[in-house]
Image (cartoon, helix red, strand yellow):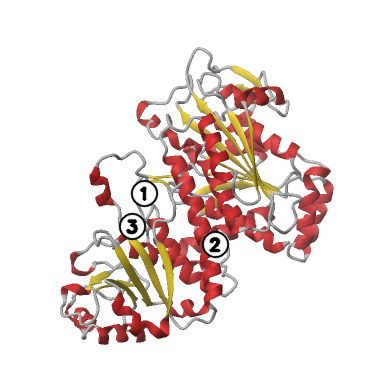
Amino acid sequence: MKSLPFEIKFEPSPQLESYAKNYPIIFLSCAAEAGAREQLLDDLSGGAIKRAREQSLRFKGREGQLLDVSGFPPIGKLGRIVLLGTEKGKADEDSDGEDSDDEDSDDEDKDSSAVSLSSQDESGVSPQTLRHIFKQGAQVFTRLHGIGSGTCLWVYDGARVSDFILSPSVASEGALGALLSSYRFDEYLTEDEHDERSIRLESLSISVSGMNYSLEELEASYSSRKCLTSGIFFARDLVNEPPNALSPPRYAERLQETLGPLPGIKVEVLTEQELSALGFRALLAVSRASEHGARVVIIRYSPPEGDTRDPLVFVGKGVTFDSGGLSLKPANSMEDMKMDMGGSAAVVGALRAISEGGVRRSCVGIVGLVENMPGGNAQRPGDVVRTLSGKTVEVLNTDAEGRLVLADLLWYAQSEFQPRAVIDLATLTGAMIVALGEEYAGFFANDDFLAKRLESSSRSSQEKIWRLPLDAAYDSLLRSPIADMKNIGGGGAGSITAAQFLQRFIKSGKNATKSATKSATKSAAGDEQAKKTKEDKDGVKTRWAHIDIAGVTWATKARLGRPRGASGFGVRLLYDLASSFADED
């Protein structure tokens, strides 16, 4: 696991004049009109910033625009200065012919609130503002390419500058944007040229304007972002690994090596023989033709303080390579199938961040690690397998293997633990990519309370999810004449029928609803609360959500804060969800 690529420092605003000249490059986030800090830097630059603005025909201080002041000498006592626009609105032209780094739509500010009702953090800062600041931090790092090693200063004086004063989460979110943009997976590059693609930055200093909070509060906010960076980088590394380097046994060993030493973490690995004895028949059917034995890894996190009962349980699909089995995929659909373990990577990345961040909520991660290969011993279309629950499944397509893995994992999670809620993540269906593309993950939930918590965490974490329906009307598509169900539906609604399949492995009863009743009594008061409590007493199923991350696990093109390849999606979402349950307690 790589360490953080560079150091983040926070500089107090009142001393800007004294320390600005110490930096070889300064990024100034600015608005359409010059602010007080821009005017101060302009004085230090001998008026270069003002001249650059006047002579540029394109730069209007809008989001996505930038202007390199070094093209308008002299620059007085300062080094290179780059202006970054912050005003809302799409820049139809980029300054001085330079392309904007921002490939994200300007509609994202709207999209982030479209998930549900708008929300703010504890200091009143909106998710849209955090998204904006994240993108600014990402743009700062992206524009550093080619400057060589050294230090850099980022001065924020643009639209939403008042939010820097209001909340420490704003400055730390900008730092996160810069850090996540720095990710590179170069483990297997041996040529010297690969160094040219790496930005050798030693430290990035962020000048914070007139803080309404202490430096200690800012450092605490940034500390959680550092933990997130660690977890996201870990998840990205795992997904980017070639399948010959990350077989199920090796994956399990890596989790023991990386997560085992972390505070509050206990890692248990179930071997193929143990899984067989326990009755994981559906999971083992998927891995039958692989030379690499299946593994299930259980990661228990106990917080340093707080309730260790009723844990949140995160379940991840970990198909380290998916050929489709005997229902073989076409060649061009197989080349990226190392990413079919993205759900497991999100779970273990989140557990890493949760441990390092000391989140006060008991959590358990369960990942099923298998390889789906063809061969003489492979399961066949037409086979019937008996799951851990005892229910039988007619396997009509061996490329719909993820739901078989999850069926056993979900049942085990509820049998071994009395979970507050169970959330599974999986690159499950191509139909989800058709529906939502690479912008949103689709999710299903059997409980509105849990769905709202996930939607809130989606807004806070900037990881976009969209709820789709669970409806018994789709169950007829899963009927089998010889088994309890078949593993594929028929025709359309592929993502929904997959979720309906998984829901059949969610338990009901007193044990399943004990913690649901507890959290319902703590949720919003009123008629909805009373109705929910009554449903819990009547035996509603375990609170469960399924998140299909097929379209968001692997990025086909780079964006600010997210390189091409593994995105690490899900780590921030689960971290925020765990934190929200800790705050509730």
Element class at badge 2: helix
Element class at badge 3: loop
The residue labelled by disc 3 is 103
Q: Mark 3 or mark 1, which is nearer the start of the sequence?
A: 3
Kind of residue sitting beneath label 1: Arg
Kind of residue sitting beneath label 2: Ser
Q: Report crowding for label 2: few under 14, some 14 to 19, many 20 or more residues within 10 A (C-alpha).
A: many
Q: Nearer the viewer, mark 2 or mark 3?
A: 2
Residue 72: mark: none
Kind of residue sitting beneath label 3: Glu
Residue 430: image location, x then y, percent: 47, 37
Q: Quadrant of the C terminus?
A: bottom right
Q: Give the answer, above or below, for where 569 lies relative to 506.
A: below
The residue labelled by disc 2 is 224
Q: CA distance from mark 1 to mark 3?
A: 19 Å
Element class at badge 1: loop
Q: Quadrant of residue 191?
A: top left
The residue labelled by disc 1 is 184
From the viewer's perspective, is 569 left or right of 583?
Answer: left
From the viewer's perspective, is 358 left or right of 398?
Answer: right
Q: Mark 3 or mark 2, which is nearer the start of the sequence?
A: 3
Residue 180: image location, x then y, percent: 42, 56
**In the depicted view, which residue is nearer to us: 395 or 21?**
21
**In the depicted view, which residue is nearer to us: 457 or 571?**
571
